[in-house]
């Protein structure tokens, strides 16, 4: 059970910590992080030149992410696919932890969803949810 829950918690902690970074620095920081994630498997990934091609792809996506959270989210989803491929092949992101790529494949979509939501701070996300819930309630009118 912990195998599934802990990566999601790590993704939520990542989102929470990023909420402390003010915009536009938050978006720029995340563009850099997703770009760096493209290089995570280069040293021992097992896919040869494909590792470099993937890294180059995430450089392009990360560059576009400097101005768009959507691209950052796409980058995290691409990294999720790469994590799954590595997990299936048996070449984990952390060689001494067999399920590390599996965990990364669960963590990355959490971050991607946050990016697709606009990379809002946790407070702004909460305020938006509460506001939508208030708007969805039927109006109470006084009847005469």
Image (cartoon, rainbow, N blue to C red):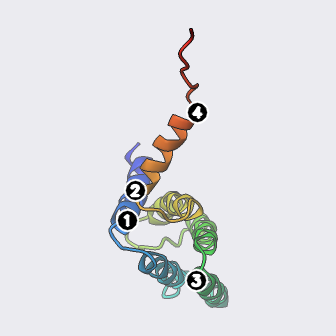
Which residue in the protein does label 2 denote? 122
Q: From what the image shows, is residue 60 above or below residue 76?
A: below
- In this rendering, does residue 81 appear at all? yes
Residue 75 quadrant: bottom right
Residue 10 in percent (x, y) is at 38, 59
Any part of residue 7 in sight: no
Of the numbered discs in the image, which one, if any, rests on residue 54?
none
Q: Are marks 1 and 4 in contact (CB under 8 Å)?
A: no
- Cα separation, mark 2 vs mark 4, equals 21 Å
Q: Circle 2 — which element?
A: helix
Residue 11: x %, y % from top left: 43, 59
Q: Are marks 1 and 3 in contact (CB under 8 Å)?
A: no
Residue at 52% x, 78% y is 34
Which mark lies nearer to you, 3 or 4? 4
> On residue 136, which mark appears?
4
- Cβ atoms under marks 3 and 4 closer than 8 Å: no
Badge 3 marks a residue whose secondary structure is helix
- Mark carried by residue 62: 3
Q: Earlier in the sequence, mark 2 or mark 1?
A: 1
Place of residue 138 in the rendered image (x, y in percent of width and height, measured from the top left): 58, 25
Crowding around mark 3 (Cα neighbors within 10 Å: few <14, some 14 to 19, many 20+) is many
Residue occupying the point 47% across, 76% down: 30
């Amino acid at each position: 059970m912990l195998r599934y829950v802990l990566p999601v918690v790590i993704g939520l902690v990542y989102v929470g910590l990023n909420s402390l970074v003010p915009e536009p620095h938050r978006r720029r920081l995340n563009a850099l992080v997703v770009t760096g994630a493209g290089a995570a498997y280069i040293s021992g990934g097992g896919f040869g030149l494909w590792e470099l091609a993937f890294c180059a792809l995430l450089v392009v996506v990360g560059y576009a992410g400097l101005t768009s959270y959507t691209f950052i989210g796409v980058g995290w989803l691409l990294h999720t696919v790469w994590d799954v491929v590595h997990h299936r092949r048996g070449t984990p992101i952390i060689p001494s932890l067999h399920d590390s790529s599996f965990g990364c494949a669960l963590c990355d979509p959490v971050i991607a969803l946050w990016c697709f939501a606009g990379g809002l701070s946790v407070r702004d996300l909460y305020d938006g949810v509460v506001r939508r819930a208030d708007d969805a309630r039927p109006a109470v009118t006084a009847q005469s």
